[in-house]
Structures are given as structure tokens and as C-alpha cells.
Image (tube, rainbow, N blue to C red):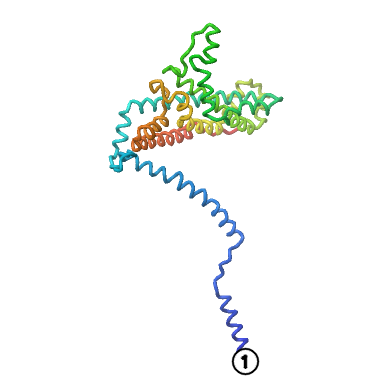
Amino acid sequence: MAKINHKKDLAITQNVKNKQPKFEFTLKQQKYIFVYSCLLIPLLFFIVIRFAPTLYTFNVGFREWDILSPEKPFVGMDNYVNLFKDEVFLKSMLNTIIYVVVGVSGQLIIGLAIALMLQRINRFVGLFRVIYFIPYITSIVAVSWVFKWLLMPNGIVNDWLVKLGFESQLFLGSPTQAIYVIIATMIWQGLGFQMIIFLAGLENIPKMFYEAADIDGANGWHKFKSITIPLLNPTIVFSAVIGSIGFLQSFTQVLNMTQGGPLNSSNTMVHYIYQLAFQQYKMGYAAAATVILFLIVLLLTLFQMKVLTKKFEY
């Protein structure tokens, strides 16, 4: 009887174990858990470091937020209304538009021209690519001060101009020249990036299109207009969007070369935001300007992606 009861106890125990839920994951489920766990870390980073401060900026923009005062009263849209009555802000907004239009156009045209020339050479290709790319990885502050030194009233450039029989120029000291000197500096430094992007786009264009065009008797301009430009459209859109965002955020060159002068002729929205926040301590005012800049970047990016993007089939 004892043996029989023992067998019954073992059977009951086994049945209970079989009825217990199993929490073991399959290999596919384990992979998904691992992948989403890895994605969770950067997601938390962006929420804490990026998204949360951005949303907090909207709150600050609706307040009279002076960091020297303990009280931060809610003022509604007053900061935004006052900004559009501020002549310096309006001037910096106009200057920023000039930076984007002239700078992005210059970078795209010159960058594409350099990429096309580099694609045609067969010797020392790597050397030329390195030479054009070095300025892009050089310190922005260092480049800004070198150009500032070269363009001083008694600098090297003016010395050459005088020796060639021309009048010396104010350059960074001129209200009409300073902004374009800074834009030229930014274009020169950003050419390496644009060159690499365009070279990658050109390499992805199938050679058979050019061979078919040669058979049809097309010249270089026709091939460039009908094959290169249409098939480079995704690359051009990407370069235009990235370039526009970069020029909208122009700050380091302005701070080091002119500090927004002379007479705010080279000031930008980002540099003016810096002046409001960290020189005048008007955080609410600066936050409102930051929100306006954010909306400009967002709308311009969407506009460019909508208007510039075109589909071509051959």
C-alpha cells in the first residue's frame, strides 16, 4: 500500500508541474527583447536630453523669465509680440535668410562642381579628396580666427590688394561686406562635406544611362541636365536640407569674427538668442525667439522636401 501511495504522489506532483505556466521565451522573442532594450537607452536619452528641454522652452517663452528674479510671471504672447517689434531681432532674421539663400546655393553649386571634377580624374583622387575635406574637420573657431586675421585692415589680403593697385577693404568692419565674408568662410569650410555627399550620389548613377546618351549623340550639357541632375535629386534634397539647417544655426563664425557687427549687419537669430539669454539674462525673451527659430527650421525643411523632391524614371 505504501508503494502504491508513493506512485500516486509522484503522479500528482508531475501533473502539478505540468500545469504550472511556463515563462520561458523563444529565441525570436529573446531577440526582440534584446533589440528593444538596446533601443530604449537612446530613446530615454533623447526624451531626457532633447525632448523634455524643448517642451520646457515653450513654457519659458510664455513667461517673463529673468534669471536674476525669483518670480517668473506668465505673460502669454507678450514675448512674441515684442520680438516682432524688436528691430535687432527683425534684422537678425533677415540676415539669417541671407545666410541660408546665399550660403546653401554656394555650397551646392561649388560642391557639385568639385565632385564632378574629382570624378573625372584618375590620378591622386584620394589626395584631392583629403585636401578638400580637411577644412570640414578643422575647428570652426580656428578657421574663423585665421580668416579674421587674414582680412584685418592691415592683414595679408589688404596688403596684396594695395600691391596690385586696388584700395584696401574693410571686410569684417564693413556693414555691407561682413555678412558675405562670413558666408564665404562657411561655404569654404563646408565644401568637403558637400563634395563627399555628391560623390556618393554620382557613383550611384548607372553608367549605362551615359552610354545610351553617347549613342544618341548627346553632349556634356545635355547629359548633365537630363541624367545627372534628375538622378541626383535625392542627394540634392538631402544636401539642401542639411545645409539650410546648418546656416540657420550660424553662430560660432559670427561670434568669433564679428560678434554680430558692425551695426548688427552680420547678426543671426542664434547669436541674438545668445545675447538675450547670456548677456541680457532675458530667458523668456530668448526662449520665445528659440521657438520661432524652431518653427522656421521645421517649416523650411518640410517645404524643401515637398518642393525639391521629384521622381524620375528611365
Q: Quadrant of residue 56?
A: top left
Q: Residue at x 35, y 41 (%)?
A: 60
* Front residue (pair 37, 285): 285
Percent x, y of residue 78 = 28, 36
Residue 28 appears in the figure: yes
For residue 282, above or below residue 114 = below
Query: In which quadrant of the rendered image does the C terminus lie?
Result: top right
- Indicate the secondary structure of the residue bearing disc 1: helix
Query: Where is residue 147 shown, x and y percent of the image?
Result: 52, 21
- Residue at the image position 62 percent from the left and 30 percent from the top: 199
Q: Residue at 52% x, 51% y: name it.
A: 41
- Report whether residue 231 is seen: no
- 279 to 164, vertically: above or below: below
Using the image as rendered, state which of residue 139 and residue 32 is in the foreground.
139
Q: Position of residue 24 (x, y in %)?
A: 58, 66
| Residue bearing the label numbered 1 | 2
Amino acid at circle 1: Ala
Residue 123, by quadrant, is top right
Crowding at label 1, few (<14), some or many (≥20) Cα neighbours within 10 Å?
Answer: few
Residue at the far right in the pictured view: 123
Q: Is residue 169 left or right of residue 113?
A: left
Q: Is residue 182 left or right of residue 76?
A: right
Q: Could you tell me residue 181's position as x and y percent? A: 49, 20
Furthest toward the bottom, the residue is 1
Q: Quadrant of the N terminus?
A: bottom right
